[in-house]
Structure formats: structure tokens, C-alpha cells
Image (spheres, grey):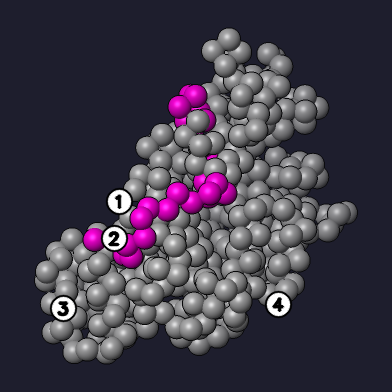
Amino acid sequence: MQISPVLEQVVLAYSPVFDRKLGLVSTRLTVFPASPGAAPDGAALLEALADAFADAPSQSTALPALWLNVADEAWLDAVLDSAQQSPRPFLLEVPVFMAAPREQRLLALKSAGQALAAGGVAGVEPRLQPAFRYATVTAAERGAVTPCSPLPLPWLCSGARIAADIDGALEQGALAASGWPMDDDIAYAIPTGMPPEVKGIVELMNRLEREEPPDRLEAVLTADPTLAFRLLRYLNSAAFGLRAEVTSFRHALMMLGHQRLKRWLALLLASGSPNREARPLMPVAARRGLLLDELARHAGDDTMRAEMFIVGVFSLLDRMLRQPMPVLMASVPVHERVQQTLLQGAGPYQQHLALVIAIEQGASADIQAAAEAAMVSRSELNQALLRALSLARELD
């Protein structure tokens, strides 16, 4: 697949966007210039992003699937100039302090149907309010939004780092909240190993590891019809990339083999927590796994891809299942390389996991440094990220 040259000119970071039911409804993508002074190409950027989100309609009636935050004035102007020609709808965030000099362009875009959000708690000048559909407020600023000081527009929250930020913004009236609810301390339950809800998945993974015959594997699914349904749903999703529909587990085993099936069982395991607090982390874990898989696509064999996928999916397992990682890893059959990464912060996959986390943290310099350490080019990284985000929406 040919990589668009514009993906070498920018650094991309992203965060998931959650609605009031904690469902993932959009993606906030932040664009940084890779180097100051380079001529921005807004049309090429929007085309590359449109390709990534082409088959991923929004799950929300309010927000487009893509919420674009351009962290550079020249690139923002280039995107504004090209927005009307974008092949896909998207929400464009414009900082309030940049709005007044661009008044006529913003009003023209609004008239053309472009969704705009005013970035900043300071509010929008009354004459500019008609240009915007939303306001955006960072998690740090949301305390200024009160019943006595409401925003003049429906608002979205960005930059959440803990679950309380997301819950607080949504309870406060935000239509949606963007961020990473995982910087707070983990409240572990009493260590008991794998919860009962996921023991069938662990048993199936163990039998796959032992390469037991198909009838022994199918026996686990026969005893757990819900697990069978969820597994076949994943296998038949576009993210799995099969050309023919999988109708049974035996059929899946014949077509895919043990390694590829194990990684999707890992995804089922990560999505099996009964805790409400884990719900927004499930799509995050899936995206980590898919991004690591994409990064390994040109760098290793199928075994390496499967292991990197599992590293990404399991990297939040302790937080989702509220059990210490050593307790969980004692129950799950994973390779020593995966255990090194998750338990010791070492091994051959650690630098790639650090790169994924840097993208989530959203600092351009840190992303570029982590990419260099992992020996991943900027264009390869951006292509892998956009591909992973597109595939992930098929699993939501």
C-alpha cells in the first residue's frame, strides 16, 4: 500500500471520545507539524484521513466519526482552505483566539455545512457564535463551566486523564468527553485470579496452547454459547480481514490456525470485565493491540504480530479486571516475550509499547523520540495508526 507523502510531514496523536453511556462515539485526532516551516498540504491531509475513516461511520447522531484538532496555525489555515472539498464529514476544532481573524472563512464553512467547534473556555464573541456548532473545554478548565456561567454552545470536554474527569464532565452536561481514563491508581479487588466471567476464554486459550484436538476446543464453546457468539462476531468483523464468513469454531481453526485465534481470544478476555469502570478501557485496549499489530506488519512474522497484539490488549488487563498483573499472567498462556514486556517493562516489544503510550500522551516531541527508539519512520507510524483506528471501529 502506498503511503501518502503528507504522512511524513505531520505527527499524529489521538484520544477516544465517549458519550454519556461511556460508549466510544468518535476519535479526536491531533495534528502537529513534523518540522516548522514546511509548506502544509491541507487537501492531502484530509484525503489521507478520509481514507482511514471511509468505512467507519460515526456511532453518534451528534458527532462525526473524526474530531480534528490541528495544533499549528499554518496547518489549520490549510485545513480551513480545503475543508469544503473533504470527501468525508468531520468536526474541526478552532481555538477561540484564532477565530476572529478568520471570521469570514468560518462563517462560510458553517454555511457550507462544515461542523466547527470553538476551543477554549473563554467563550466566543457573540458575532462569531453562529459559526460554531460546539464549544470545547479541557478537563482542567471544566470547573469554570457552572450553572451561573454556562457556555453559549453545547460543549465537549477534552484532555481527560482519569475516569473522574470523564464522569465529571458528562455529569456536568458535556455531550461527550475525550481522553484517557487510566492515570489514576488502580483499585485492586481481592486477588483471586481470573474472574468467573472470563474463565471459559482462559480455558480455551490453554487448550489452544496445548494444541488439543478440535472437538476438545469446541467443547468449551458448547458449554458457553455467549462466548461462542462473541468469538464468531469478532472473527467475521472487517477488522479480521477474512474473505469468507466463519460459521463455526472448527471452520475458524482450519482457516486461521492457533496463533491468529489466540490473539482474538486475548481481545475477548480484555473485553470480559463486568466492571462499569472498565467499559471505556475496552476499546482503548483493542486500539493498542491493533496499532502494535500494524507496527509489526512489515517488521516480523505472524508470531511476532500475534505477540505484539497481545501485549497491547493485555497492557490494560490489570486495570480492567482489577487484579495485579503477575496474578493474571500466572493464569494466561503467553510467551515469555509478552511476560517480559508486561511484568518487567523489558523485552523486544517494550519500545513499541512505549511508542503507543507516547501517542496516547499526545506530546509531539515524545512521539518522535519514541518512534526513533523503536526504529519506526514517521510515515509508517502514521499509516499504522490510521489503519488501526479504522479497523478498531469495526469492533466497537
- Kindly indicate whether the residue at mark 2 contacts the one at mark 1 (C-beta within 8 angstroms): yes
- Distance of label 4 from label 2 (alpha carbons): 38 Å
Q: Residue 313's mark?
A: none
Tell me where residue 103 appears, x and y as whole percent. 74, 25
Amino acid type, residue under disc 4 in the picture: Met
The first of marks 3 and 1 along the sequence is 3
Q: Residue at x 15, y 78 (%)?
A: 218
Q: Nearer the viewer, mark 1 or mark 2?
A: 2
Q: Residue 274's mark?
A: 1
Pick whichever, 97 or 7, lies toward us.
97
Tell me where residue 184 appears, x and y as whole percent. 55, 46
Q: Residue at x 61, y 24 (%)?
A: 143
The first of marks 4 and 2 along the sequence is 2
Q: Residue 195's mark?
A: 2
Amino acid type, residue under disc 1 in the picture: Pro
Amino acid type, residue under disc 2 in the picture: Pro
Does residue 333 appear in the picture of this structure? yes
Does residue 46 appear in the picture of this structure? no
Q: Residue 218's mark?
A: 3
Q: Residue 375's mark?
A: 4
